[in-house]
Image (cartoon, grey):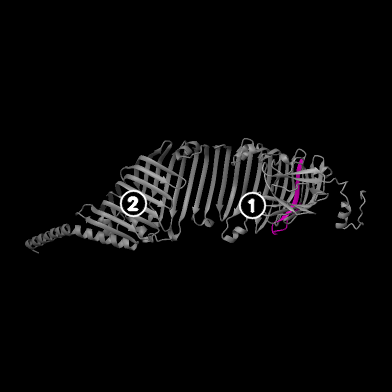
Amino acid sequence: MTPLAFKNRLLLAILLSVLALLFAIWFAPSAVSNGLRLWLWWRARQQGLTVKIDKIDAPFLRPVVLRGFHMASARDAAFHIEVSAVRATVGLNLKAILMHTSGRAIRSLSTEGLRLEIHRSNPAGISLTESGWATLQKLLPGNLDFGRFDLRVEDGPAVILLRSVALSASETDAGRFSADEVTIASPWFRQTFSHLRGATKWEDNRLTLAGLSLTRGLDLPSVTADLSRLDKQNVGLDFDVEVFGGKIRASISNEWRSHRSNWNLVGLAADISLTQTSEAIGFTDRLGGVLHACKFTFRGNSLDLTHATASLWTEVTGLTWRDRAADVIMLGAALYNRQVELEQLYVKQKKNQLTMSGEASFPTNSSDWLKPDFRGDISASISNLGDFASLFGANPGDFAGEIAIEGTINASERKIGGHLTATGSALTIFKAPIDLLTAKINVKSTQLEIEELELERGKDFLRAQGKIDISHEHGSRGTLALSVHNLSDYEPNTLLSSSLGLRLIFQGRTASIDSLQLQDGPIEIAFNGTIDFTDLQNVGVTLVPSQALFDLSWLPTVDCVNALQFLPAENVAGPSPGIEKIDLHGDARSGRWNIALKKDAGPDEEDAICVAPGGRSLKIGVRDRGAPEFGQAALRGFQYGDRQPLSFSLDRP
């Protein structure tokens, strides 16, 4: 080849290169603009998204500018997402895009007038596909600069709102973060943080905010959002919080592959002042004490706890709330393989101590709730029942004394077992003084056995024992003995102010009154009878006197009785109808009762029972057992099987 020919070819090659360069400069903006618009439309359509862009500017070898950008999700999507920006500047890495190298596809991203809204609208809806998350991972920029944007996130009643936020971050230099207002609202919590300032770091697809002071006593040294596994549908959040003298460290990650959302949470807390926390949150009731230590873990799907694992350990010291106070409360619990284990619940209040532990199987279906599987132990040593009762909201003045409780209970395949013992002295329970309490209760597979139950107050006592068949509705049986010297000591508004001696024999939902002795001054009255409590809204008590009673309340003007008054029948002039039996019936829940007298002559009488000063006294005459009325003994003997001939003699039989 001659030198001239070589020179001509060289000039032609240079000319063609210049023409190609001019062609690229001329057509590249249009090609990039149209190509980018087409690619965004295509990828958004694959993910069920709608993208609108007013204009795309793509200067040669300069960042692409998108004006009037708007993106929205479909109506049936799991999350309703809306993203809009007045202007977005994107620095593309064309080499990585065209040659599929490992570099970032976007070198830089900056926005103006950005607004984001995310609503969890349809939990069963469609989210991004696996390829969509992989694409989103590749679009993460190397540098970002979001100037003054708003963000709103809603999940049911919970709302997170960020106003006027500015965020810049770079892989090489520290960035800045600022927010005029951050609001967190839920049914149980609402707080607003204003004028937040901090530094940022963007490294390996992890964004860290540092040095945030939220409010007095609440600082956020660092919070890191991990987006490095976004293509595998996994995000994480780590944060450290210095809160009211203590610290909280937590790591949270969520993976939602295979249409299942699996959470992995680990949280630690130590030495947090509950007093300062309650003031900052805005509790209306003052809360005191220190959260000395706490550890919480959870792994699994929050909607499928049967396959989740969790653990909790916490210790609170010096707890005070309203009038409640406790020195130490410790709680340890775990969930594993459908087993809930209460490792320990320990409460210490001065000399009062309560310890509980146990385990139970987590039901897998509705039928398992009818046959629970659990085991539990309880141990309590209470030196001041009033103080201990106040811890659970009771009036400390209604309780007093010492009590000790030991017991265990277990259940499996609808069979239950265990035992409970309790002893107490100098007690006050609901303002009722009890000198001595002894209780022994055994629980068997189908039976609840009251081995011993005894309450004593002075010379008064209540003793009970019996068995209740859990598998049969009417399988209860037992005895109850009661002795009270003055009923008004226990119930000021009772019908009687006399002493009472009672012995009951229970069988199913009825009871036989083996003996009922009433004494009002010199008058003694004896009854037997029955009690029917099959329907608690219509309890019936029938009392049959063992001696002659008479109705002395002639022509009553008020049909309401507030007291029973017993009088010697010998002091009453003139004939009076005899009382064959007394019926009491009423609603044990509402306390509305009636009393009825069945007489041997004249109409029967029924009155409502009311509280003084309303109503009247029901006067009943009592015949001494040794001096029955004329001919009455012989008549009763004839009626009840004693076939002695009738006699009109005034002599006593």
Q: Tell me the tag on residue 116.
A: 2
Farthest residue to the bottom: give it: 1
Quadrant position of residue 389: top right
Q: Amino acid at mark 1?
A: Arg
The mark lying in front, picked from 2 and 1, is 2
Q: Is residue 174 left or right of residue 630?
A: left
Asked if the magenta segment contains residue 166, the reply would be: no
Q: Is residue 268 left or right of residue 617?
A: left
Q: Position of residue 441 (x, y in %)?
A: 72, 49
Q: Position of residue 121 (x, y in %)?
A: 41, 57
For the residue pair 502 and 232, the one nearer the viewer reads as 502
Q: Residue at x 26, y 62 (%)?
A: 38
Q: Is residue 23 above or below residue 276?
A: below
Farthest residue to the left: give it: 4
Q: Position of residue 40 (x, y in %)?
A: 28, 59
Q: CA distance from mark 2 to mark 1?
A: 51 Å
Q: Amino acid at mark 2?
A: Leu
Magenta span: 460-478
Task: Determine whether the residue tagged by mark 2 lies in a helix, strand or loop.
Answer: strand
Residue at the spot of label 1:
375
Question: How would you classify the magenta stretch by its main secondary structure?
Answer: strand
Q: Position of residue 473 (x, y in %)?
A: 69, 59
Q: Is residue 100 above or below residue 243?
A: below
Quadrant position of residue 414: bottom right
Asked if the magenta segment contains residue 465, the reply would be: yes
Q: Residue at x 62, y 47 (%)?
A: 357
Of label 2 and label 1, which has the lower sequence position? Answer: 2
Q: Quadrant of the N terminus?
A: bottom left
For the residue pair 219 and 651, the one nearer the viewer reads as 651
